[in-house]
């Protein structure tokens, strides 16, 4: 019989349904590097790098929303690295977004190129038209960060399948509540849980999710051998964030839609991008595969100086990188070398009341 309840309800009651009398309702933090294990190993916990009950509980919770097997990592980049190290070998071809999170390309260039892996890139907006012949692994990111372009995941997945390519989707900007790459045919979904999943800007974490045991087993092996394990304290904070994920995502998405709507048509702003806007070039593809359009709005002011002034004047935005937190934040992406105009701002919405955030944003635009 299939469970009639949504993944979020099941996540919230994952623990409560299995409690013995007198056990805490909240998730205990098991702070342990070693576990009682006399005699021969019997599959129970014995050492923290091999498994921790708090971490495994959080993996099961994320597994409910991904509807997949999940391996947790200490950052989004270590989750991406795990897939690359587990599945790429000298001579392989990898196809990666040209305009998504820059450290994914940086890792390939610094570590895998010198080992004989051939790295090709394709722009997110025409990833489905890329040449997949001989490609072992492809990494898409949609909406892309920071440019917010979109690719049709099902179309890319069909091409990848035909070419025998493993398709990996970075779902950080959307979250599985708004977009489901595994349902659309991707083989692996990865996320920086640092962002919306944890949601409070107080930890780094990431995960790899897949419905293929053949793809997950080498990822787990790499994690165990390389020691890229998340601490039980951080896993606990992630668990706390997950309990409010649906509420936070709904508010942040509503904020982003309201900001984008308020800025569209404003003559002081150019290059406005938000996949939820009907006028956005990515809206058609986004609407087919997304249930919500994420917390990030991007736009340009006339200069770096104007952009920095806007950020400094904004009463409800932290001048900070990252996104998916409870407080709004904004930054000029040119400072990281992204291929964007000097006045390009990535505005990451938090969970402030919608009317406050819109009013604050419009007031900050008034120099
Ligand atoms: C932040 C981010 C990452 C990396 O996550 P970390 O936890 O910082 O390592 C990967 N992909 C995207 C889209 C991100 O925004």
Image (tube, helix red, strand yellow):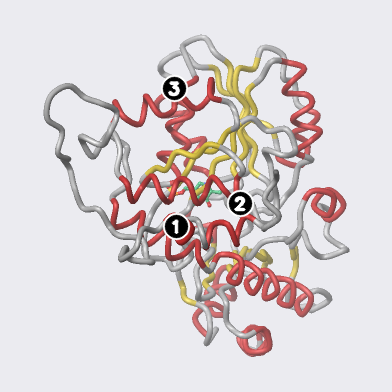
Q: Position of residue 270 (x, y in %)?
A: 75, 68
Q: Position of residue 28 (x, y in %)?
A: 30, 60
Residue sitting at x 61%, y 47%: 171
Mark 2 or 3: in front is 3
Q: Mark 2 highlights which residue?
A: 145
Label 1: few (<14), some or many (≥20) within 10 Å? some
Name the residue located 33 percent from the left edge and 66 percent from the top edge.
24
Quadrant of the drawing holding the N terminus: top right
Q: Which residue is mark 3?
A: 218
Please state the horizontal and vertical placement of residue 275, each as a whole percent of the image. 77, 59
Q: Assess mark 2: CB under 8 A from ligand 1? A: yes
Q: Quadrant of residue 261?
A: bottom right
Q: Are marks 1 and 3 in contact (CB under 8 Å)?
A: no
The residues tagged by marks 2 and 1 sit, at their Cα atoms, a distance apart of: 34 Å
- Confirm or deny contact between disc 2 and disc 3 (CB under 8 A): no
Q: Is residue 279 above or below residue 80?
A: below
Question: Between marks 1 and 3, how big is the CA–CA gap?
Answer: 28 Å
> In terms of depth relative to the viewer, which is nearer, 321 or 29?
29
Mark 1 highlights which residue? 15
Residue 114 location, quadrant: top left
Residue 333 versus residue 317 in the image, above or below = above
């Amino acid at each position: 019989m299939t469970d009639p309840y949504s993944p979020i309800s099941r996540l919230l009651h994952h623990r409560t349904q299995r409690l013995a009398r007198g056990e805490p309702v909240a998730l205990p933090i098991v702070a342990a590097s070693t576990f009682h294990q006399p005699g021969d190993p019997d599959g129970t916990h014995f050492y923290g790098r091999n498994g921790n009950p708090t971490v495994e509980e959080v993996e099961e919770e994320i597994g409910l929303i991904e509807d997949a097997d999940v391996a947790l990592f200490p950052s989004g980049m270590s989750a991406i690295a795990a897939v690359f190290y587990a599945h790429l070998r000298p001579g392989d071809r990898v196809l990666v977004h040209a305009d998504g999170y820059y450290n994914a390309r940086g890792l390939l260039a610094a570590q895998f190129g010198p080992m004989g892996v051939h790295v090709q890139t394709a722009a997110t907006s025409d990833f489905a038209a890329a040449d997949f012949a001989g490609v072992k692994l492809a990494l898409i990111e949609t909406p892309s960060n920071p440019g917010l372009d979109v690719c049709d995941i099902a179309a890319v997945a069909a091409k990848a399948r035909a070419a025998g390519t493993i398709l990996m989707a970075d779902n950080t900007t959307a979250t599985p509540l708004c977009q489901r790459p595994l349902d659309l045919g991707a083989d692996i979904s990865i996320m920086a849980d640092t962002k919306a999943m944890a949601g409070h800007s107080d930890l780094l974490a990431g995960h790899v999710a897949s419905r293929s045991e053949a793809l997950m087993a080498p990822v787990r092996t790499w994690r165990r051998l390389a020691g890229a394990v998340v601490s039980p304290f951080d896993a606990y904070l992630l668990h706390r964030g997950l309990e409010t994920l649906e509420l936070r995502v709904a508010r942040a998405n509503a904020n982003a839609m309201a900001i984008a709507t308020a800025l569209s048509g404003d003559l002081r702003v150019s290059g406005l991008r938000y996949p939820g806007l009907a006028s956005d070039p990515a809206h058609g593809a986004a609407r087919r595969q997304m249930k919500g359009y994420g917390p990030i709005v991007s736009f340009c002011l006339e200069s770096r100086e104007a952009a920095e002034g806007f950020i400094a004047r904004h009463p409800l935005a932290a001048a900070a990188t990252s996104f998916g937190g409870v407080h709004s934040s904004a930054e000029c992406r040119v400072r990281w070398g992204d291929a964007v105009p000097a006045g390009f701002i990535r505005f990451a919405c938090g969970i402030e009341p919608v009317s406050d955030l819109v009013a604050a944003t419009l007031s900050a635009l008034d120099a």
